[in-house]
DNA sequence: CTGAAAGCGCTTACAG
DNA sequence: CTGAAAGCGCTTACAG
């Protein structure tokens, strides 16, 4: 099964490689009709299929971009990926997805591999720990767009949720429904992880705004594996909360699991709102009130920004932060 | 920002390109220690990063495989993809995921594009409509593995669930709990779509096995958009079913949506089992009994089979069908 | 309207 | 132990 190359086609059709190449690239301006037909027939006869690798090597473009997500387990990541893929498919670009799994070393490795593969650009959900690498990408003027997390001091386009607003929407809604003892449940608060940091500060600001006191014991954050006991502890307080804001889908799942195991009822025993519009929010009993991120728009924006950078590589690096508005979807959990 | 190439490194280090290449490929057998160090230093100094494209062109391997799923919206697809990625990451392979979105033309386009990109192999969740293309891949001895759907007459490795068994497990469980009026809810039954066809026939066989009559009006299949009215019709029958088997996650969602809208209770008004272990099965109220596919094992197997084919291209095409066992996860929905 | 030639950035026998 | 040369399969000025 020898590979058919452009040279074989040329020989068979009795023309030069250049002419076949012109044909492949639709440059018919100066091509006689009969040459064109002859080439077409030969291609079909031989079953020729172009090797894009060779073209990419010459043209210095692979029409492929890379996406590295901090953790693919978050619904938000998967939704954004879908959006990015949609945009790319339209432009006949391919996407290579990599999951850093919250491990900075993996992220580093992926950045290197993708660049070695000559992808035309990168969209990063940064782990936040590889500052040097990020800096290098930017100073080399490599097309890159960040999403979900803000890296301080980096001069590059970043697409973010208005995280504080997300918490505000939730707390406002709780207050409107008469709740005042409102706790928050979050994954571990780490400095680089913008959504967690900002959603927590948004929660605090919202409480202040409603003149509710901030109780340290109502602020619960920890790893998935510790969540159950942390939540348990929360409910054992002498004055337990009557409402909980779960700041992402993973925390919400843990909370629901606890609620179910302990036969609590929503919203009678505990009101709740989750940030991230989980797939089952609608069909859950009761329906879950959520704060949705416009994941599709955010992914679309990230892709568009990246394409803009890919196209005008020379341009000075205009770095902008794009904040997207969350929306409250009221259902029955408070 | 000129690209640094192997030639630049060679010049700077005062050696030939060949020697640098040896270095890059860890062929140190005949390399003097000082040359090695000199090259290493030069690489760091210049910030050289190899262009894998050029290597791939020469070596005829991209260490990349392609995966084309019929529809990425099925949990099963996403689970299998995760497994494939895990296996590939271990071997330092990359994966390009494409979503045919149930459109055969898209599938066709993706097969062509991925081959043009010289991926080393392909894992296909086939739409079932591009028989000629599939046949071509196989007769060209191109490394390919099929998963989820069986294409009749194709001589190639295929990884499948024992779909009939999945239905059997569900029906058995219903019967054990005293149900006899058991309906089935499925996406449209199309000839090429193995899981749907086999799960339906499994349902019928299981009823027969338990000496229950098969009622045509209990067999409901249709597009997502028609599901609500189809389900409604089912419940309007003079003798409505007391149990429903949802043959995949999408059908289950529709069913739960209907159940909720109409304030039915599970399992009092209707018992149910879903094939596919949805993420919220555990935390749903009540917990949902499901039949789980060993998606991880199946993805792993597909990847392993593909790697085997990639490695021994000359081998005669031994085509085998691998059937995997589903498992019943009993919760509280019947 | 078409062809010969150089080149993209690597690897790989082969020679010495 | 290292280098010169050919080649992977394309594209792209340039010449005619």
Image (spheres, coloured by chain):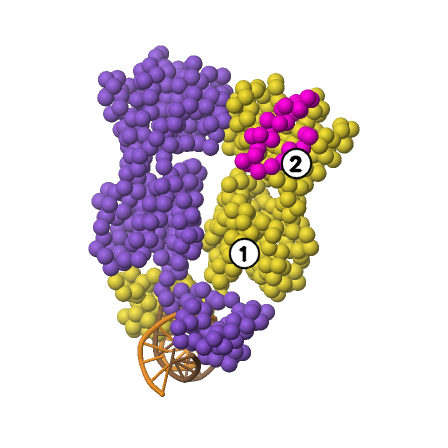
Chain colours: A purple, B yellow, C brown, D orange
Left/right placement of residue A175 relative to residue A155 reads right
Please state which of residues A308 and B12 is positioned toward the viewer in this rendering: A308
Q: Secondary structure at mark 1?
A: helix
Q: Is residue A272 above or below residue B324?
A: above
- Reading the chain from its start, which is encountered first: label 1 or label 2? 1
Q: Position of residue A176 (x, y in %)?
A: 32, 18
Residue A104 position (above or below residue A6): above
Question: Could you tell whether A172 is left or right of B63 in the image?
Answer: left
- Image quadrant where one finds the N terminus of chain A: bottom right
x then y, percent, for residue A169: 31, 26
Check disc 2: other Cα within 10 Å, few if <14, some if 14-19, many if 20+: many
Q: Residue at the front extreme? A: A33
Q: Nearer the viewer, mark 1 or mark 2?
A: 1
Depth order, front residue of B75/A99: B75
Instruction: Give the residue displayed 48% in from the left and 30% down from the top.
Output: A280
At mark 2, the secondary structure is: helix
- Residue depicted at x 40% and y 19%: A334
Q: Which residue is mark 1?
A: B108
The foreground one among A26 and A48 is A26
Q: Please, which chain is the residue tagged with disc 1 on?
A: B
Side (left or right) of A31 relative to B188: left
For the question of whether residue B113 can be seen, the reply is yes
Q: Residue B156 occupies which quadrant of the picture?
A: bottom right
Residue lying at the far top of the rendered structure: A238
Q: Which residues are magenta?
A: B217-243
């Amino acid at each position: 099964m020898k590979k058919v190359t452009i040279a074989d086609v040329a020989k068979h059709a009795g023309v030069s490689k250049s002419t076949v190449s012109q044909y492949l690239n639709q440059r018919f301006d100066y091509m006689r009709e009969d040459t064109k037909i002859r080439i077409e027939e030969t291609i079909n006869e031989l079953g020729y299929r172009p090797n894009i690798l060779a073209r990419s090597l010459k043209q210095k473009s692979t029409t492929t971009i890379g996406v590295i997500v901090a953790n693919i387990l978050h619904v938000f990541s998967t939704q954004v990926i879908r959006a990015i893929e949609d945009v790319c498919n339209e432009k006949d670009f391919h996407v290579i997805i990599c999951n850093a799994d919250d491990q900075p070393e993996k992220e580093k490795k992926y950045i290197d591999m993708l660049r070695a593969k000559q992808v035309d650009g990168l969209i990063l959900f940064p782990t936040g720990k590889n500052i040097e690498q990020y800096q290098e990408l930017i100073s080399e003027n490599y097309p890159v767009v960040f999403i979900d997390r803000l890296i301080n001091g980096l001069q590059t386009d970043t697409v973010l949720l208005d995280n504080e607003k997300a918490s505000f929407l939730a707390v406002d809604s709780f207050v409107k429904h008469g709740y005042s003892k409102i706790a928050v449940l979050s994954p571990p608060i780490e400095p680089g992880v913008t959504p967690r940091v900002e959603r927590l500060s948004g929660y605090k600001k919202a409480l202040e705004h409603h003149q509710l006191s901030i109780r340290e014991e109502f602020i619960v954050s920890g790893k998935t594996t510790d969540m159950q006991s942390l939540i348990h502890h929360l409910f054992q307080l002498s004055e337990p909360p009557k409402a909980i804001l779960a700041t992402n889908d993973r925390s919400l799942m843990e909370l629901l699991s606890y609620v179910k195991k302990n036969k609590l009822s929503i919203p009678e025993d505990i009101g709740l709102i989750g940030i991230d519009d989980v797939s089952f929010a609608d069909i859950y009993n009761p329906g879950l009130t959520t704060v949705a991120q416009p994941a599709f728009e955010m992914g679309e924006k990230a892709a568009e920004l990246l394409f803009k950078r890919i196209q005008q590589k020379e341009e000075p690096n205009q770095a902008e932060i794009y904040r997207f508005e969350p929306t409250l979807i009221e259902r029955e959990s408070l």
